[in-house]
Amino acid sequence: MTISTVPRRVKILKQKFPQSLGLPFKKLLPDTVIQESLAKLFIKYSRRLFDPIVTLWAFLSQVLDTDKSCHNAVSRVIAYLVGEGVELRSTLTSKLFD
């Protein structure tokens, strides 16, 4: 991939983004690339629903979303996790601290 194709790919992603479900950055920025960067920085983390990889994908999704709400970003994460076969106990984020 050359530098000149990057802006074109970003433009295509921005056009397709509103119609995509889940976390579309998984294809553009694979978890192996993120894991490699974390390893180089000696960053250790636990595998959780919102690990650094999913959090980064959700953040990028939120930045590109037209309304930029946290609600939409969390909805995309939930769609991604369900698509991955993860069983979710609850999607009510207000109940996390009860």
Image (cartoon, rainbow, N blue to C red):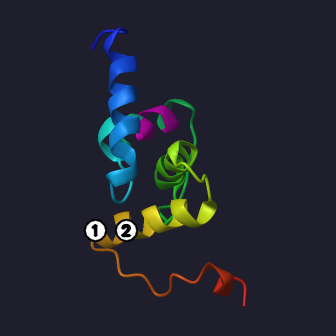
Secondary element under disc 2, as helix, strand or loop, is helix
- Give the image location of residue 11, x and y in percent: 38, 27
Residue range (magenta): 34-38
Q: Identify the residue under disc 2.
A: 79
Asked if residue 29 can be seen in this view, the reply is: no
The kind of residue on which mark 1 rests is Gly
- Give the image location of residue 77, x and y in percent: 45, 63
- Give the image location of residue 85, x and y in percent: 27, 73
Residue 92 or 55: which is nearer the viewer? Answer: 92
Q: CA distance from mark 2 to mark 1?
A: 6 Å
Q: Is residue 77 above or below residue 32?
A: below
Secondary element under disc 1, as helix, strand or loop, is helix
Residue at left 62%, top 59%?
Answer: 69
Q: Is residue 97 above or below residue 42?
A: below
Asked if residue 13 can be seen in this view, the reply is: yes
Q: Residues within 10 Å of mark 2 (few under 14, many from 20)?
A: some
Residue at left 30%, top 9%?
Answer: 2
| Horizontal relation, residue 37 to residue 4: left or right | right
Tally of marks: 2
Residue 41, by quadrant, is top right
The circle on residue 51 is: none
Residue at left 43%, top 70%?
Answer: 78
| Horizontal relation, residue 30 to residue 46: left or right | left
The residue lying furthest to the right in this view is 98
The circle on residue 83 is: 1
Residue 38 or 82: which is nearer the viewer? Answer: 82
Residue 32, by quadrant, is top left
Labels 2 and 1 touching (C-beta < 8 A):
yes
The kind of residue on which mark 2 rests is Ala
